[in-house]
Amino acid sequence: MRFASPTLLLVLSAVLTAAAAQTPPVSPSPSPHGPKGPGRPAPDFALKSLGGENLRLSEFLGQVVVLNFWATWAGPSRQQMPELEKLHQTYRSAGLVVLGVNVDEDGARAASFAHTLKISYPVLLDTRKQVAPAYDLQTLPTTVLIDRAGTVRYVYHKYEPGEEQDYVERMRALLDE
């Protein structure tokens, strides 16, 4: 078995140290650092809703937006959506907007799923996956909290039961800004 020479180890150590010094700090958000991550403007889009009307994200400037990307085949979506419905019912009068963005190819299946779960907040259809890439989807569901100025503040690339308590704390802070 051969080992690296001390000189090679010294050079490798120097290279790794220099690379680490140039690495940007990780965001304090639950998300790593996607291209449209915290601190950046939320990419605007328009999508057709299950109700048939086109909705544009920029129409909700001045309100705090919870943007939730989901799919019928993603088990955690089924767990998360009723919790988002509760947030919608509780905080909409305070200026909170919940928007669900379904990324399935079958809009009828998404409609049936949302109806079964008694979702009353707007569900938008991204069947051609035009919007999802702008939000750096890594897993489903992905939830993005957007402040009143249209800036992405927090990104959650998963859902675990009980996580909505973190949403509530962060949403309340955003609603108070």
Image (tube, helix red, strand yellow):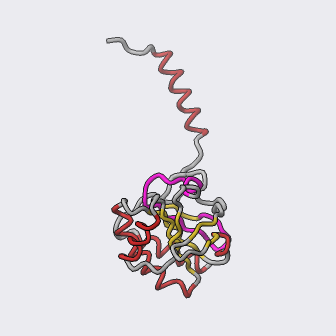
Estimate the x, y position of residue 118 in percent, counting from the top left.
39, 80
- Towards the viewer: 26 or 155: 155
Q: Residue 114 vs residue 62: left or right?
A: left
**Residue for point 42% across, 81% down:** 86
The magenta-colored residue range is 132-152
**Residue for point 49% across, 17% down:** 8
**Residue for point 43% across, 54% down:** 139
Q: Is residue 61 above or below residue 8?
A: below
Q: Can residue 151 be found in the magenta stretch?
A: yes
Q: Quadrant of the N terminus?
A: top left
**Residue for point 44% across, 13% down:** 5
Estimate the x, y position of residue 44 in percent, counting from the top left.
66, 63
Residue placed farthest to the bottom in the image? 93
Q: Quadrant of residue 158?
A: bottom left
- Towards the viewer: 4 or 167: 167
Q: Quadrant of residue 148?
A: bottom right
Q: Is residue 13 above or below residue 94?
A: above
Estimate the x, y position of residue 110 in percent, counting from the top left.
43, 67
Residue placed farthest to the left in the image? 1
- Towards the viewer: 7 or 15: 15
Residue placed farthest to the top in the image? 2
Q: Quadrant of the C terminus?
A: bottom right
- Towards the viewer: 114 or 7: 114
Estimate the x, y position of residue 65 in percent, counting from the top left.
57, 73
Q: Can residue 82 be found in the magenta stretch?
A: no
Q: How many discs appear? A: 0
